[in-house]
Amino acid sequence: MPSESAQTGARMKVQHQIKTTAYHSGGFIGKYQRLVRETVIPYQYSVLKDEAQDTEKSHVIQNFINAGKALKGEDTADGFYGTVFQDSDLAKWLEAVAYSLSLSPDRELEETADLLIDQIAAAQDTDGYLNTYYTIKDRDKRWTNLLEGHELYCSGHMMEAACAYFDATGKDTLLKVMLKNAEHIYDRFITGKTEGCPGHPEVELALLKMYRATGNSHCLALAEHFINSRGCDPDYYKKEAAARNWKVWGANPADPDYMQAGKPVREQTDAVGHAVRAVYLYTAMADLASLTGDETLLAACRRLWDSITQKRMYLTGGIGSTVHGEAFSVDYDLPGDTAYAETCASIGLMFFASRMLENEVDGKYADVMERAFYNTVLAGMQLDGKRFFYVNPLEVIPGISGVSPTHRHDLPVRPKWYACACCPPNVARLISSFGLYAYGENEDTAFCHLFADGRVSFSNGMRLTCQTDYPYGFSVTYQVEKGGRLALRIPGYSKTFRLSVNGAELSAVPQKGYVYLAVSDGDTVNLTLDGTPYFVYASSKVPELTGKTAICRGPLVYCFEGVDNGGDVLSLSLRDDSVPVAGSYDESLLRGIVPLTASAFRTEETEGLYTCVRPGKKECSAVAVPYYTWGNRGENQMRVWMEEAK
Amino acid sequence: MPSESAQTGARMKVQHQIKTTAYHSGGFIGKYQRLVRETVIPYQYSVLKDEAQDTEKSHVIQNFINAGKALKGEDTADGFYGTVFQDSDLAKWLEAVAYSLSLSPDRELEETADLLIDQIAAAQDTDGYLNTYYTIKDRDKRWTNLLEGHELYCSGHMMEAACAYFDATGKDTLLKVMLKNAEHIYDRFITGKTEGCPGHPEVELALLKMYRATGNSHCLALAEHFINSRGCDPDYYKKEAAARNWKVWGANPADPDYMQAGKPVREQTDAVGHAVRAVYLYTAMADLASLTGDETLLAACRRLWDSITQKRMYLTGGIGSTVHGEAFSVDYDLPGDTAYAETCASIGLMFFASRMLENEVDGKYADVMERAFYNTVLAGMQLDGKRFFYVNPLEVIPGISGVSPTHRHDLPVRPKWYACACCPPNVARLISSFGLYAYGENEDTAFCHLFADGRVSFSNGMRLTCQTDYPYGFSVTYQVEKGGRLALRIPGYSKTFRLSVNGAELSAVPQKGYVYLAVSDGDTVNLTLDGTPYFVYASSKVPELTGKTAICRGPLVYCFEGVDNGGDVLSLSLRDDSVPVAGSYDESLLRGIVPLTASAFRTEETEGLYTCVRPGKKECSAVAVPYYTWGNRGENQMRVWMEEAK
């Protein structure tokens, strides 16, 4: 998009150069960040060190200790425990800790992290190899199972942690460990010309972070290598599987689309396979495109973006609609009740969106980023921070959901910590690093993609304080501490808006979803968005959604729960001539929400399963709550998409 | 139901005592029976003897030949081929042949059958054992795997064939073979007190047929034993599996509900597990109850009937909604697009219904029997008799159906003959024996449950000829050749009807769905039912069907196909104030149907996947065709349940 670049200046700079400071504890995001700091991080730490009650053993810290022992030839009585990617749980937790420390210093927590980093360093082999599964269990199996082995995946997550921890604390122990690890990988895959790409993309985006943090060219070369060679030999995994006599769980090497390796990345058109793998890969592709200006790669990213957002994404920003392989299905196959829509996949979609925003400033990317965050990502965590959804259906009916063979994965309430603990630390690191997604910049412009109460300073010198009750209030006020060019996003849902500087209204026409204005030190900028609740309709190409409507307000998708609606939402239909009404902000309800009320009909119960008599309907009103809050009041019916009736 | 019994006389007599004669070739059923005779039976025979093109090898006849050789110690170079229940394909085909011969003698076909029966007899061991899989492969494994082994299942189907063939031809070679086989089973399970019940019920209903055909008390005792001991030890299959070191495909012995063995049959309340197994078992239970007057057993049958028909049955009479185990799901889980709804399961539901009718005359049983037949059972077969659906969804969207991981089993067009060929011969035997379901009798009454052009004679001496264009014409005329008491069913869909004898109108109030009248030799009775198309609605407890409606006419459920509706039925909604209009009978369309037309709206295409702008709608008309004819004009969209709009 040369014209856009020309208009908004050069490409935006990369995220890590932005220093965001803590949000006010009163703001919506600030409250969530405090929840992560005070509840999620400590609880997850207790899990990692096997001290949590009622939880499957993690053993991840002990695995690192044992790997260190194994390297020294010492006895490791309790060996390795967990999945082949267990190491990544600690990495993601460390990354969340780093972001949290950058927001709110905590000496005790930092000391804990330092100690763990020492244990990680001790688990690194002299050649730079780092993975507790192989180091403890069988060093000869290293690098022989890229399909399932997750060695590069675990390295990637630890690299992300290393960058974040260096950024937050200035301490480079882990960064050095991971640079040495990157060098080991470089020796093998570049110098040693070993074939193969990671079965689970992740290291690519991490290597690019490492490159941006350190300028290490081997990191860039490795990322380019893994991205560019991916899918060039679709039979690679079959050959690899034929060459070894062991497996982890028996992933199918003959289905390269599952790991987005069916064709070279620049030829890919549809988002396919395991959804988390997909968006992690696309994130790296978009980041590499923004670094190198590779238009062919960017074109592929745009196609894949459209494939996801125009054909394969839930209204809630959930992706990967099928439980079979936690994967993308075909176009328009978006069942609400059997959805997979993994929390991690929506987090990855935010990554992808944020990297696309670095390629081209277009509100459509931020719209999806916001949709994913405020709906699926937040829904992934119970309001008390103690339980987590991996799977995020748009409809839950107790008695069917979690019970029927086709709905067994769609649970009516959040389960306790899983053995496969991918989502909880992913939510923690995402929330703690919200500023990385909320803001962008280039030489002369500060971009405000998302709205959150708090302060931010940019590396171009600009500094802002933002005051807002978003997503429940739609007035966003920026106090400009250090001025420059400001780009404010006008969300796609906000058909109207008001903009003022120091009280004087400004008329501005959004350009690809952003208004641009020059601001000076001390200016007060107010943006007031449209907070009117609105109905949403889906394309009739989505079989599941014909005749249905959903209610949203701002970025929030709403849902109807039984607890607010007489225990039964199935017999509710919404009046198609009704206007949903926003109630007052209620601090006591679901930790603070604005409920919506809509005119509705209650269909009378029929006799028997089928009847020839049209069931009667009675007028009533129906109450909706934000989707992210569902399932916090026990098992009950929940529905996002409702019938429309007259 | 003592009062009902009192009212309608004693319990009805059993089916096999009814001698139905051929239906007129012009009638709807007669045409289908001719199709089976002229196309399905010959084609299936070519498959069984491995002469069909483009079809997986059956080998079933060769298996019997080879088993005979094996018993004589001769070489069987090509051994056994196929599934463990391959024998049943030949049995079901033979049964269909028997019914067909009783309708229309065919010397060549009968000679073929006689020859095959000799080959079957030669495959029987001296001790009465009969199963080609074990006889050829490993005789030591006999009876050690009731969970998967299908020995009793195959015996059951051959017993059914034997009864039918004896009934049709008077030849008892196969009947004697199967009596000897039953004696072998009796020796093992009754005399020898061997534990265990068949993993796949079938032999129970077959043994009761054998008992009714021969009066052999061991057959009755065996059926009672398998029914009464079922589920008494829910751990039986686990113990059996632990005691052997082999398996067929690894069925789970720890899920006794899958084979309806989780509790004793008299304690069962919900229809669970593999749907075909379930209805085969319930059929036997109902038949035993009608033989013995066991009220506790009948009460269980009534509960299971209600579980199916009030909570777990599609509008089309399809049952077993989930592909996972081809099984019943939980209550109200009836997705149309991912339905399993196996053809064989609806055939089994007809069996169950017909046996319940022998216990108590109630139109609700015949209503379901008719629903299953005219919709799912007939849909199972292509109109040319050459291809078959095993799976019968209520919605098909090319691009999703058959492709999406959750819809892979729901094919848009009928596939060719499967290796597991359960459904095609099952459809063939059902259609050929339609009269067994259409009529019932007791000492003084002839019951007309279903309507079909043709003649029928009852063992109580009554004889009727029925003239009707049903299910497309709603006038049913009976010429009484030999009079008595006549019971005519008034279907549940027919809210009004007209009844006349020799032109004089009669006012009659249906009693549990039947009108009763005394008729004399030479009388002409006319029953005219209501053929007005009607909308159907589902209970709002069915999440998939809220806000939807379906159109029916008589017993036929209709569906909307793309080919009649501009290629797109997803964007169609039906006007809720419209009256569907029946067109003229069109001989040239889908081998003769009455299409329906309904006022509808066409929703305009939206921009993108989701929109805040309510899509526009244009008035249009929509054309529906009978569900059983769907998928006969190539891949296209199909939908039974439509949105309703104003």
Image (cartoon, coloured by chain):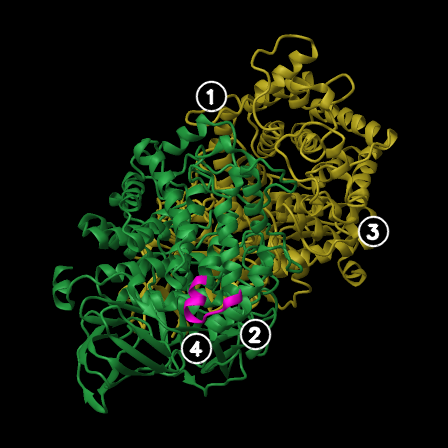
Chain colours: A green, B yellow
Return the mark for residue A562. 2
Mark 3 chain: B
Report, in whole angstroms, how far the alpha carbon at label 3 lies from the one at label 1: 48 Å
Mark 2 chain: A
In the rendered image, is residue B602 in sight? Answer: no
Pick the residue in front: B303 or B607: B607
Residue A15, image x and y in percent? Answer: 30, 62
Does the CB distance between marks 1 and 2 fall below 8 Å?
Answer: no
Residue farthest bottom in this picture: A503
Q: Mark 3 points at which residue?
A: B294
Looking at the image, residue B529 lies above or below residue A454: above
Number of numbered discs visible in the structure rendering: 4
Residue A550, image x and y in percent? Answer: 41, 72
Query: Which marked residue is nearer to the observer: mark 1 or mark 4?
Result: 4
Does the CB distance between marks 2 and 3 fall below 8 Å?
Answer: no
Co-location on one chain, circles 3 and 4:
no
Q: In which quarter of the image is residue A361?
A: bottom left
Q: Name the residue under label 4.
A: A28
Co-location on one chain, circles 1 and 2:
no
Query: Which marked residue is nearer to the observer: mark 1 or mark 2?
Result: 2
Q: Which amino acid does label 2 sit on?
A: Gly
In magenta, the rendered stretch is A98-108
